Image (spheres, coloured by chain):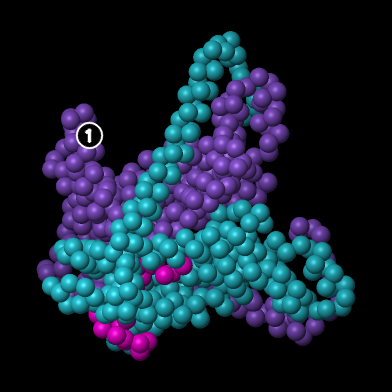
Chain colours: A purple, B cyan
Amino acid sequence: MEESRIEIKSKKKLGDILFENLTLIFALMIVGLVVFISIEMYIDSAESRERFGLGFIFSSNWDPVKEEFGALPFIFGTIVSSLLALLISLPVSIGAAVFLSEIVHKSVRTPISFLIEILAAIPSIIYGFWGIFVFAPFMRNTVQPILQSTLGFLPFFKGTMYGTGLLTAGIILAIMITPIISAITRDVLKAIPVSQREAAYALGATKWEAIKMALLNARSGILGGAVLGLGRAIGETMAVTMVIGNKAQIMASLFEPAYSMASVIANEFAEASGSLHVSSLIEVGFILFGVTFIINSLARLLIYSVTRKA
Amino acid sequence: MTAESVLKSPKNLKRRKIMNSVMISLCIAAGFITIVPLIYIFFYTTQSGISSLNLDFFTQLPKPVGEEGGGMANAIVGSLILITIGGIIGIPVGVLSGIYISEYSKNVLSTIVKFITDILSGVPSIIIGIFAYGVIVIPMQRFSALAGGFALGILMIPTVAKITEEMLRLVPQSLREASLALGVSRWKTTLRVVLTTASSGIVTGILLAIARAAGETAPLLFTSFGNVYWQTNIDEPMAALPLQIFTYAISPFDDWHRQAWAGAFVLIFLVFIVNLLVRFVTRNKFSGNL
């Protein structure tokens, strides 16, 4: 499409110059906004950064009364719940994408992918609400007892079963990011030429062998989708806040309540007691922003690398 | 990866066929595992919400703790005001930068803008809340609807920009060429021909961004803050539907839970209708993920 675009060589009219620059200004506003957000958070977290330095990341002491702040339990909670979500979601997302793009008939594919698209747009507060009232009791009464009686010798499945906690947060996050990862996997699979699969069939490959080849060729794009999903899970706030248990501790058991970076901001920011408390919360936000920025950049580059070729 | 290496052990056909059936079955199972919880959440919310929904929900103010009844009228109006402020900020920036990315795409700068727009869409919404707090709440010395609307506006920008870009790219090149050949200048072509052709798609895209913003809770926690009274001044704290749902959901009262389900249903219904509309307008034209 780019190639056929006509270039008008004659000198540009005044209206053209004005209009192009007008749209350019608004486009640059987006770039400026992202820069501004980083600068603002950097400045507003100055008090906490000067006071605690790098120790902020490694200390697990979060005590607003004594004005001691360390973000380790939140970093731990965010990383564990998000990785758990990715671990559960990735195989399911790839399977679902293969199911929709390679196995199911076209007449079924469109309504199902439409359904998944709608469901992916459900606000996270609703996932959290459902999590508290339906999913957490289900975890407490069914899933956690089963896990404890079968895999209870592992440290991850020991302890009291509250229903809410790291595992529940991880599974809710997995439900939320699966539509995202599977949508991108489908897009990437679409970018792999059909002729490759046809060639595999012609050589006697089974359907799965042909699909496996397509998946291997699409791997960097799928990885991009996975990283994007991870980024979403890391930044997810309301659903996690409602089911993770909100207790700043680092425990081996996935049944234990924990706390995430986004959740502590959501819970404490509005009622923060002093400027150091606010500044520390902003520093948590700044770390969160930095991590999601890097993760999203990586994801986009990986996805572009596959879909651009198509 | 070549087909040859996949087939390097073609001896055991039976084993390969079993492998094939197992993997295909697993993929089908994965398809169902993906859809079932999502549908369950959808129907559970719809069922709990419809049974709790009544006229009071739309017309009454919240009752004090301990009293039954009341509604979320102030939160619904609050959400409408917040979204309006968000739209005033988010829609022009989104549409115009979408035009820039699509129509001046030979430019290196437009690639950068596109990339940053994608990055912005991945920034956690709570971070945008902190930003709005620093830019508006601190200078004003109080929580306000203006700060909440500002945060929602920023969150709308990437969605609107992305959809505008995708929709403009769907306009056939020949239409632009025909207009330019008639001597119409480039900017008038963009506004009167390209934008007009893509307008239905862009409008539904804007609706999609609005539906998403309507359900955002995290960025409003310490910007708009919430309010149990009628409040229509945009420089005062204001109630919003998702905030009210959150407060009621984590409360210990059954009656509040019922109202929260009703609110959740209103949000889901909004998302459903808008997505249906988007699908209807962009049917067959567009298949990317938004």
Q: Position of residue A251 (x, y in %)?
A: 18, 45
Give neighbour class at mark 1: few <14, some 14-19, many 20+ (Cα, 10 Å).
Answer: some
Residue B233 is one of the magenta-drawn residues? yes
Span colored in magenta:
B211-239
User: Could you tell me the amino acid type at mark 1?
Assistant: Leu
**Is A237 left or right of B84, judged from the image as shown?**
left
Q: Quadrant of the N terminus of chain A?
A: bottom right
Instruction: Decide if residue A199 is in sight here.
Output: yes
**Dominant secondary structure, magenta:** loop
Tell me which residue sits at (16%, 65%) in the image.
Answer: B253
Residue at 26 percent of width and 80 percent of height: B61
Can residue A252 be spotted in the picture?
no
- In the figure, B99 relative to A244: above or below? below
Residue A97 placement, left or right of A79 = right
Q: Position of residue A154 (x, y in %)?
A: 20, 32
Element type at mark 1: helix
Dot 1 corresponds to which residue? A147
Horizontal side of B172 relative to B275 (left or right) equals: right
Q: Position of residue B146 (x, y in %)?
A: 39, 83
